[in-house]
Structures are given as C-alpha cells and as structure tokens.
Image: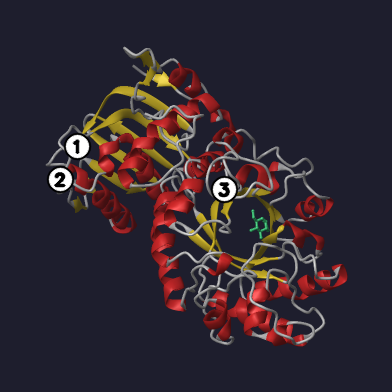
Amino acid sequence: MRIRLVPVLAVIVLSLPLTVTTASGGPKPIPLPISLATVIPAPAEAETETEGFRLGPETVIGAAGAARPIAEQLAAALRPATGYELPVRSGAAGIDLLLNKGADQRLGDEGYALTVRPGGVELRANRPAGLFAGVQTLRQLLPPEIEADSVQQRDWVLPGGRIVDRPRYAYRGAMLDLARHFHTPAEVKRYIDQISRFKINHLHLHLADDQGWRIQIDSWPRLATVGGAEGTGVRGIGGGYLTKADYRDLVRYAAERFVTIVPEIDMPGHVNAAQVAYPELTCDGVAPRPRIDIRVGYSSLCAGKEITYRFAEDVIRELAEMTPGPYLHIGGDEAHSTPHADYLAFQERVLPLVRKHGKIPAGWQEIAQAPAARDDAVVQYWNHEGATAPVVAAAGSGAKVLLSPANKAYLDMQYDLLTPGGLHWAGTIEVRTAYDWDPGTLLSGVPEESILGVEAPLWSETLRDLADLEFLAFPRLVALAELAWSPRATHDWDSFRMRLGAYGPRWTRQGVRFYSSPQIRWS
Ligand code: NGO
C-alpha cells in the first residue's frame, strides 16, 4: 500500500477509528497506530508503506565523520529500553545515517529524508542538523516504551515508508526566564532535551530583570553576587546565577542538540537588580530597594550618564565573548519610566554596540521605534493587538520579525482560569488557541519573508521548579513547534490533537508533568 499523505494527511488520520464504547458506556480511546503520519511536528511529505523494519539484537548503526556523534546519540537513546548493543560503525549497516554534503537542494540545512524498508533504514541530510532532526522523527516511530530506562520485552518495529522533511522557518524558539525565579543548569538542560525533541532550535535565556541578575560578568562582579544572591526572585524565593563556566557548558550542551542559545539582558527598563548592585546606574545615584513583587515598568537606566554605556558595552562584550550563536538580545520592553527621547537615544547607542561585538541585535518589539533597529535586527513581536507602525516599518527596512504573540505563544498564560501556575493578563491559552493561527499571516503589513520564526516564551513569575515549567510548556510548546516547523498545508487541528494525544505516554514514561488538556484524546 502506498498512500500520498500530504496534503491529505489529515484525511487519513481522521479515518482511523477513534474510540470504542466500554461496558460502562464511556468512550475508551484506542491508541493511534504509529506511522510516518503520526509524527509531530508534521513532516512536509510522508508516504506510508505496510512493511517496516524490525530492530534486533544484531542491528548495527552505520555512520562516518560528522554523522557519527549523531548516530551515537541515537544508539544511546535506544539502548536502555531495547537492551540491544546497537554498535555504531562506518560502512553500510541496518540503520544508516548519511551526509549528502549539500547535494539534495530540497533539504536545505536542517531537512532530512528518511526511508524505512524491511531491509533497512536510511536517514540522509545535507548537514548534521538535518540528521539530528531525522533522529527525532525516528525515535517517535518506535513504541512509547522506547522511553523507558530499563529493558522492555517487546517488538521494536519502525513502520515503513518515506519522509522528506524540512522546516518552514529557520528560527524555532523557546524562552526561559531565569530572572524572576532562577532555574538551575540541570533544569535548563532537561528543558533543552525536551524542546529539541520537537525540532526547536533556539533557546532564549532571559538573564536579568528587576528581581534578579543571573549571569556572571567579570567587569561588574556585584551584578551576579548581589543580583543573584539568595533571596533574589519573586517573593524572595530562591536565588542563584550562572557562572561563565555554567553558561559555556549550557551553550555546549545545547549545541550538541542543535539548539542555539540566545542570551538576553533587558535594558533600559527591567534593571532594578543591576541598580541595587550598582547604585551609580540610577540617575540620582541612590540605591533602590530590592524588589520581589511582579510589577513592571518602574526601573530605568539613565540615558544621560556615560556610565550607562560603559555598563551596557561591558555586559554586551562579555556576553558576546561566551556566545557562539549569532544573536544577542537586549530586551527593550516596557521602559515606561524612560522618557521617550531617552529611550531612542539609548537604543541609538546600544544597538550598534551589539553589532560592534559581532552579534545581530534582537529585542522586544519596542526597539522597532529606534531607527537603529533595522537591517538585520530581530524585532520580537509580543503584543496581541496587531503589528504596530514601527514593527511594520522595521520589517520594511530589512529587520526580521520573531513572533511571540502573548495571547497565543506565551506559555506562562494559564490554560484556563482554574489551572495552576501562570498569569492571564493576555487571556487564557488552551492547546487549540496555541495551535490555530498562521505565523505567515498574523501581522498585516509584515510579509511572510520578514518572519524569522516563532518563539514560545515562558516567564517565571509564578514558576519555581521544573514541574511548574513542564506543566505550562507541555503540551502547548509542541503546538508552537509545529507552527514553526511544518508547512502550512499540513495544518489541521484534528490531526494535531490525535498525534499529540498519542505522544502523551512518552511524556508519562519520561516523568514529564504535562497538562492533560481535555481538548486532547490522550492515548
Ligand atoms: C511581558 C513582560 C514581562 C513579563 C511577561 C509576563 C514582556 C516582553 N515583558 O512580556 O516582563 O514577565 O509579560 O507574561
């Protein structure tokens, strides 16, 4: 059997039986059979075939050169549950990971082609990032028990067929706020593990805000030691900061999973913690009191003082030095206590400093008011009232727009008013609300070519530990990952909710505390 799945993927998935009626009369979900059509984010093209590939104790993974570390990651992921040795060797094997070195134009830098036949599995990509994406797909094709950390007695069959896949947008992001409550490097790593499974390739770290400063800066040491001391954070709970070694280790860990770290220091507002550490950063030189509430818009750097720019450049320089990725985010949101002329003057000096230190400046949408937020700058749309004139103008003169509409993409909005954690100033966001929109047409006046991608921010005012983060991120982050990765033609709520429902048992196995939304039929 050969079925063309795109764009009719939804039709096929929908035609599967969904429920049976139990003796008590209640509906009982039937697990969705795993196929190449059940992958999330939905692949660009998928064809299913009836006969698949059976993994066995004798299976070997073949990979050479730059494909090898990814093959090792695959083997490491499959060994615990299968109990198989799965050696990685160069030369043809049962599962082959091959680098085309750019030969297949359709795949770009992050796409892949996966073919599963009874005789073997072939995964091809132009670049290692594509192989990594293909490996994430391949892992979803095995039963959920593959997530177990001990040997499971069962058959391990990859369903047959072929996928040719590539992302819609280059930037598929998540953001974590380490300032309102500090999250440890171990928690950030676990988040990277999770997001990279859905082909998210950027993690934006919000490293400083009114309540805390979370990154070591050698030229201004008190930022971290005072701004990250015990008791810094909302309600005075927690505290901590990343040393440079921690940060570099996170960058390396993320890179192994093809995730680029985007560091953010928010300026000229949201700076109370910096001013507590260095009172000379205020206009009157008087130290403000530490803040542990969640109000915004009261603090500002002093645009008229030279020390402001020395501070900004030192921080930008040190961050740029430890960040191999192309972007450096300077915040710029909600500077309600910075006079407008000062805001513009500040940005005209600070945006060029980011370029001077070799990075592309990114900022929240307010930076679009500054003429320097042009060319390659990234303007992050977070409002929910449509594109403002400055955002349209910035896009018109070359800036790229990153989409984080608060009423769809903010993972810190509650699912509904009864679910724990989160805020609701931009409304409540159930899974369908997070999924049912099109990044290509969200902002009138901003053409699709100006859209860099989609990012899902998770602000931490109400979030203390990993369970809190996971509950708000999952499953909505997957909806946003699909919008950012999958072609518009695959967009289908009914297909998505069934594929998502089938993913639930994997999270259960991994101990991820996800929200079991009533909109989803969980397997
Ligand atoms: C706003 C604000 C943040 C809050 C967040 C809470 C932006 C860009 N600035 O988003 O300081 O933490 O809402 O949802």
Provide residue 479's location: percent of width, then percent of height: 53, 39
**Identity of the amino acid at label 1?**
Leu
Considering only order in the chain, which callout, 2 or 1, is on the residue closer to the N terminus?
A: 1
As drawn, the label of residue 473 is: none
- Please, is residue 293 above or below residue 401 in the view? below
- Please, is residue 134 above or below residue 369 in the view? above
Return the residue nearer the eye: 298 or 3. 298
Number of callouts: 3
**Position of the C terminus by quadrant:** top left
Q: Give the labeled residue for mark 1.
A: 55
Label 1: element kind? loop
Is residue 510 at least partly visible in the picture? yes
Decide if ligand 1 comes within 8 Å of the CB at mark 2.
no
Q: Give the labeled residue for mark 3.
A: 411
Q: Which quadrant of the picture is home to ligand 1?
A: bottom right
Asked whether, in this view, residue 20 is left or right of residue 349, the answer is left
**Identity of the amino acid at label 3?**
Leu
User: In which quadrant of the rendered view does residue 291 lie?
Assistant: bottom right
Mark 1 to mark 2 CA distance (whole Å): 9 Å
- Please, is residue 277 above or below residue 405 in the view? below
**Identity of the amino acid at label 2?**
Tyr
